[in-house]
Amino acid sequence: MATETTERTLDVREIDGPPFDLIVAALEDLRAEQRLRLIAPFEPEPLYDVLDDRGFVHESEERDGGVWHVRIEQT
């Protein structure tokens, strides 16, 4: 029986201060069948190495208004 992937969203556009700790906490809470959609007001390039080191893959897309959507899931 196939497991359905569910997506959680973390929108850090309104966060006061660096969102790194919130993002890491959200990643640690992800279950194997979940993925995380990160919405940010900038491309979170420093996060990409952290994701690679922790065994996650990501796809980034810049949308209208310079908003970035990054889909993150475990490998």
Image (cartoon, rainbow, N blue to C red):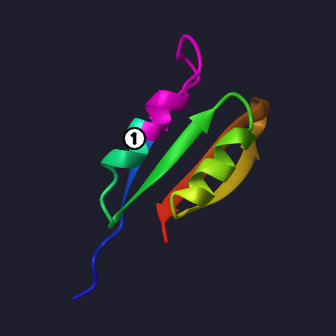
From what the image shows, is residue 66 above or below residue 48?
above
The percent coordinates of residue 54 (x first, y second) are 51, 57
Quarter-wise, where is residue 38 in the image? top right
Q: What element carries label 1?
A: helix
From what the image shows, is residue 33 above or below residue 35?
below
User: Quick check: is 19 in the magenta stretch?
Assistant: yes
The percent coordinates of residue 69 (x first, y second) are 63, 45
Left or right of residue 19, residue 40 in this image: right
From what the image shows, is residue 58 above or below residue 37?
below
Q: Which residue lies furthest to the left in this view?
A: 1
Quarter-wise, where is residue 57 in the image? bottom right
* Residue drawn at 39 percent across, 41 percent down: 26
The percent coordinates of residue 30 (x first, y second) are 34, 53
Front residue (pair 53, 14): 53
Quarter-wise, where is residue 44 in the image? top right
Residues shaded magenta: 10-24
From what the image shows, is residue 73 above or below residue 50?
below
* Residue drawn at 36 percent across, 47 percent down: 28
* Residue drawn at 72 percent across, 50 percent down: 61
* Residue drawn at 42 percent across, 47 percent down: 27
Q: What residue type is labelled 1?
A: Ala
The percent coordinates of residue 70 (x first, y second) are 61, 49
Front residue (pair 72, 6): 72
Q: Name the residue under label 1.
A: 26
